[in-house]
Image (cartoon, rainbow, N blue to C red):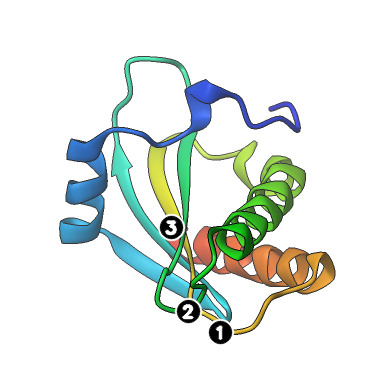
């Protein structure tokens, strides 16, 4: 896997997102929560991922977009280390559940813990 986050790896399907929240399992590494479900995709992609930040905790769109950008960057940098050996396809939604504006270092550290917990859960 390349260290990129192309459109083919983004979770956009409303049906799949609804199914994810209804039937999916979750893993938490504060301030991030990962909801996942095993699924089948038409394209040869191992993981499709979406990112969400609560409007309740961040009123301004600028702040929400900043947090989402940090999460996507941390995911992009760390996904190769954890997903090269998986065979099943997964749909992810990464939620930010904290109240404070994070730094990139905090986000990256939490993302590594989150992905480690995910790999432990599926194996």
Label 3 and label 1: CA atoms lie apart by 29 Å
Q: Residues within 10 Å of mark 3 (few under 14, many from 20)?
A: few
First in sequence: mark 3 vs mark 1: 1
Q: Residues within 10 Å of mark 2 (few under 14, many from 20)?
A: some
Circles 1, 2 touching at the beta carbon (< 8 Å): yes
Residue at 61%, 42% (x, y): give it: 83
In the picture, measured across the screen, residue 45 lies left or right of residue 113, that is left
Mark 3 residue element: helix
The residue beneath circle 3 is 122
Q: Residues within 10 Å of mark 1 (few under 14, many from 20)?
A: few
In this rendering, the label closer to the viewer, 3 or 1: 1
First in sequence: mark 2 vs mark 3: 2
Q: Seen from this angle, which residue lies furthest right?
A: 105
Label 2 and label 3: CA atoms lie apart by 30 Å
What is the number of the mark on residue 57?
2
- Give the vertical position of 52 relative to 114 (above or below): above
Q: Seen from this angle, which residue lies furthest top?
A: 43
Percent x, y for residue 59? 49, 72
Mark 1 residue element: loop
What is the number of the mark on residue 99?
1
Residue at 32%, 15% (x, y): give it: 42
């Amino acid at each position: 896997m390349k260290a990129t986050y192309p459109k083919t790896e983004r979770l956009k399907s409303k049906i799949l997102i609804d199914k994810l929240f209804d039937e999916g399992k979750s893993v938490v590494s504060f301030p991030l929560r990962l909801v996942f479900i095993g699924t089948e995709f038409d394209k040869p992609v191992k993981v499709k991922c979406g990112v969400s930040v609560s409007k309740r905790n961040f009123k301004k769109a600028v702040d929400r977009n900043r947090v989402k950008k940090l999460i996507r960057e941390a995911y992009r940098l760390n996904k190769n280390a954890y997903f090269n050996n998986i065979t099943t396809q997964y749909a992810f939604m990464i939620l930010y559940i904290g109240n404070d504006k994070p730094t990139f270092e905090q986000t990256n550290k939490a993302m590594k813990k989150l992905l480690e917990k995910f790999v432990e859960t599926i194996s």
